[in-house]
Image (tube, helix red, strand yellow):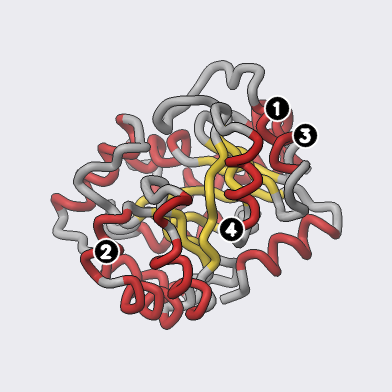
Amino acid sequence: MPELEKELLGRRDRGRKLLIPYLMGGMSDDWTQSLAAVIAAGADAVEVGIPFSDPMMDGPVIQEAALRALTRGTVPDQVIDGIARAEAPVPIAVMTYYNLVFRAGHKRMARSLAAAGVSGAILPDLPIEEIDPWAVEADAAGIDTVLLVAPSSPPDRVARICARARGFVYAVARMGVTGERVDLGSDVAKVVERIRACTDMPVCVGVGVSTPDQAAQVCEVADGVVVGSALVRRLLQDEGPEGAAAFIGSFRDAID
């Protein structure tokens, strides 16, 4: 699979706005078909969630998806194996929580992800002050550790995060957990501006981006968007790969 940062930088520099859907690994029998469907619909990379029992950053929709996956008996190795078998033509980043990484071991997890063709990882509960034991092993394995910048992050912390981030910088649109929002508020442009002052890495906005119109507005200031809860809700409602493709295709059309 392509390298996350290299691929996203190349696409951005060719003038393309970046579209990164999120879906939960193992939540249904056809989740890898949904993965293929959103890629075919125009995704530039995909985040795949590895379910965890206490997803502190996630709201009710993604919590429900994680619970459904866990109830089905999904374990991390099954999600990683599913990604490997998918042989996706775009970069795949896993999103999960540090407890699972710590239990597996930093080196083992990083090498398992790399062997499956995964090129990025997002661990939202692992702060910059404690990231080195994981990030060193991730770097060695070729896994880009994507870091988040929140509206509350002060400039000095933003600089530290951007210096350590790999792949892209995840700009959090609003404070709070993941979930659909009617209004993204006024913080998006400010967060993106603070990040751009520190790095030339792609900046993608997530947490709350729910509609094609919102995505188009965000892409006026950012390099791309992450779409999670709005997509996962449709999968929970059994819209399946076809519904996922239609939904993500509408975002592709809007940001193009």
The disc labelled 4 sits on which kind of residue? Arg
Q: Earlier in the sequence, mark 1 or mark 2?
A: 2
Q: Are marks 4 and 1 in contact (CB under 8 Å)?
A: no
Which of the two marks, 3 or 2, is nearer to us in this view?
2
Q: Is residue 47 left or right of residue 28?
A: right
* 158 vs 141: above or below: above
Q: Earlier in the sequence, mark 3 or mark 2?
A: 2
Residue located 43% across and 58% down the image:
131
The local secondary structure at tag 1 comes to helix
The local secondary structure at tag 3 comes to loop
* 27 vs 205: above or below: below
* 35 vs 184: above or below: below
Real-space CA distance between mark 4 and mark 2, rounded to the nearest whole angstrom? 20 Å
Residue linked to disc 4: 164
What crowding class fits label 2: few (fewer than 14 Cα within 10 Å), some (14-19), or many (20 or more)?
Answer: some
Q: Earlier in the sequence, mark 4 or mark 2?
A: 2
Relative to the observer, which residue lies in front, 127 or 235? 127
Which of the two marks, 1 or 3, is nearer to us in this view?
1
Q: Earlier in the sequence, mark 1 or mark 3?
A: 1
The disc labelled 3 sits on which kind of residue? Val
What crowding class fits label 1: few (fewer than 14 Cα within 10 Å), some (14-19), or many (20 or more)?
Answer: few
Note whether residue 209 is visible: no
Q: Earlier in the sequence, mark 4 or mark 1?
A: 4
Which image quarter is the N terminus in?
A: bottom right
Residue linked to disc 1: 190
Residue linked to disc 3: 221
